Image: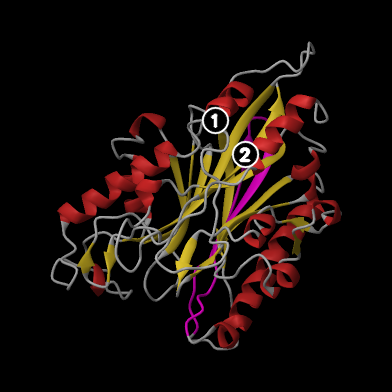
Amino acid sequence: MIGTPFVQQARRIVTREQRPLQPTFAVPNAPIMFARTLSILALILIAAPVHAQGTKAEFIPSLVGFWNIENLYDTLDSPDTDDREFLPESGKLWGAQRYGRKVEKMGEVIAALGKDLDPRGVALLGLAEVENRNVVEDLTRSTALKARGYQVVHTDSPDRRGVDVALIHDPKRYVVYAHKAYRLHMPDTAFRTRDQLLVSGVLDGDTTHVIVAHWPSRRGGEKRSMPNRMAAGELGRHIVDSLLARNPDGRILYMGDLNDDPVNKSITMGLRATGDQAAAQGTTLFNPMHAPFKKGIGSLAWRDSWNLFDQIIINPALVTGAGGRYRYFGTRVYNEPYLRQEEGNFAGYPKRTFVGDTYQDGYSDHFPVYLILVRDK
């Protein structure tokens, strides 16, 4: 099973590094991403049931992901939020055509996530920077996603810009039975940020809790804004502890744009997550994004360097497979060439819909990320 030569070989394939990206800034050991690391060989090894050296051990994947899709706003004015930047009369000329174009393009990316491993695609996907439930439903009805029948979990947050987090999921594989939004309260009552969304459901037989978060930004400087993200990490820790108290072997996925890297204190101390898989015991979480970050792998670029703000963090039961069916196998940053800026000062960066008010017809300033979970058939 887990120690078979098959799994050992497949794990080496997952962790093989892709050729370096070549952004215009010259950085030694420029960021390297997981590319088609499981490509055709992985499709043979994982997506189809596989027998390991004469045994009847078979492995079936399930993919869970997260993506900050950057400013998915509708074209209507919401008086209670500051959405004027994305209205038809704004400098961005954000009308029905551009909105529809973004929805279709984002749907195509989501449909492609992990399809080389599992033709069904991601079982669930956390989203950040969506304006409301309607835009998420439009996304699930896009041409590329409509047939999958994704359902939506969303609640409105108090963020001043009106952006929220949400979860879309395949109801045939992940059956939701409860959800709750947790608000981050700060001494500064004028401070408003995104809620953390807890969704509880059953993933192919495993009770699985998903927490989707978008932590406060670094506006004003990393150090000055750090207390806000530390508070967000502590709130996330509170949610995780409440779940572990009820079921230590329940599956927990904490995902989001955390606006900090895996080595920052908000994650290592606030959320209490480690990159050392052996140290992820008891209530200490495991952060699979720590190792890729240390190798220079990122999900977004800023001022000629890469960050890995987009993370999916798991509890020890998901690492070992204790008390359930699924266990952690690997992680990928989805940075296919079509998602990257091809030329100019930002060559190699994620290709955005806008740079300022200049329309780029891109996707997002973040690459999607996803985890590969496996279970025995």
Q: Is residue 47 magenta?
A: no
Closer to the camera in the image, 109 or 238: 109
- Identify which amino acid the numbered label 2 is placed on: Ile
The region drawn magenta spans 191-219
**Pointer 2 and pointer 1: residues touching (CB < 8 Å)?**
yes
Query: Which residue is denoted by mark 1 in the rendering?
Result: 117
* Residue 176 visible somewhere in the drawing: yes
Identify residue type, mark 1.
Leu
Residue 292's image quarter? bottom right
Q: Nearer the viewer, residue 190 or 26?
A: 26
- Numbered circle sitting on residue 372: 2
Residue at disc 1, secondary structure = loop
Q: Reply above or below: 15 against 366.
A: above
- Number of marks in the image? 2
In the drawing, does residue 69 fall left or right of residue 232?
Answer: left
Residue 206 appears in the figure: no
Q: Nearer the viewer, residue 370 or 39?
A: 39
Residue 125: x %, y % from top left? 50, 46
Q: Position of residue 340 (x, y in %)?
A: 37, 54
